[in-house]
Image: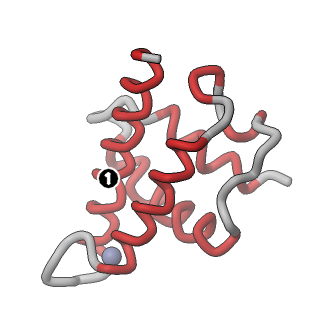
Amino acid sequence: MKANNNKQKREKKTLEVMINLYCQENHNQEYVPCAQCQELFDYAQERIKKCILGDKKITCAKCPVHCFKPEYKDKIKKVMRYSGPKMIYKHPLLAIYHLIDSHSKP
Ligand SMILES: [Zn+2]
């Protein structure tokens, strides 16, 4: 349980940083994240929290549950594509990067 919590915390933080970076450089809002990005963050966070595979999850490509709604999946993919390469050297985000990116495969 403890390990799972830490992993989720890390994923949440990674998600937050990536969304903020994307928002900052693409939406030009006074406040980051903007309402739209905040909503996306909240949604993604909920999905991570409720992921039935928890610690056993490797990437969502191997996950039997496709838990992101298409609408949010598209948004989060854009964020990952944009922020992922910029963050790859700074944060241990490969897990979540693969997690989201692998959703694109049928
Ligand atoms: Zn935004």
Identify the amino acid type marked 1.
Glu
Q: In the figure, 35 relative to 50: above or below?
A: below
Residue at image location 34% in from the left, 49% down from the top: 86
Does residue 53 sit above or below 16 in this rendering?
above
Residue at x 41%, y 47% (from the top left corner): 85
Q: Is residue 63 left or right of residue 34?
A: right
Residue at 41 percent of width and 38 percent of height: 11
Viewer-proximal residue, 46 or 59? 46
Which residue does the image show at 64% across and 27% down from the upper left? Answer: 57
- Residue 82: image x %, image y %? 43, 60
Q: Quadrant of the C terminus?
A: bottom right
In terms of depth relative to the viewer, which is nearer, 89 or 72? 72
Name the spot of residue 10 as percent of width and height, x first. 35, 33
Residue 26 location, x and y as percent?
Answer: 32, 77
Q: Secondary structure at mark 1?
A: helix
Q: Residue 72 is drawn in which quadrant? A: bottom right
Q: Residue 50: percent from the left, percent from the top? A: 58, 43
Vertically, is 86 above or below 36?
above
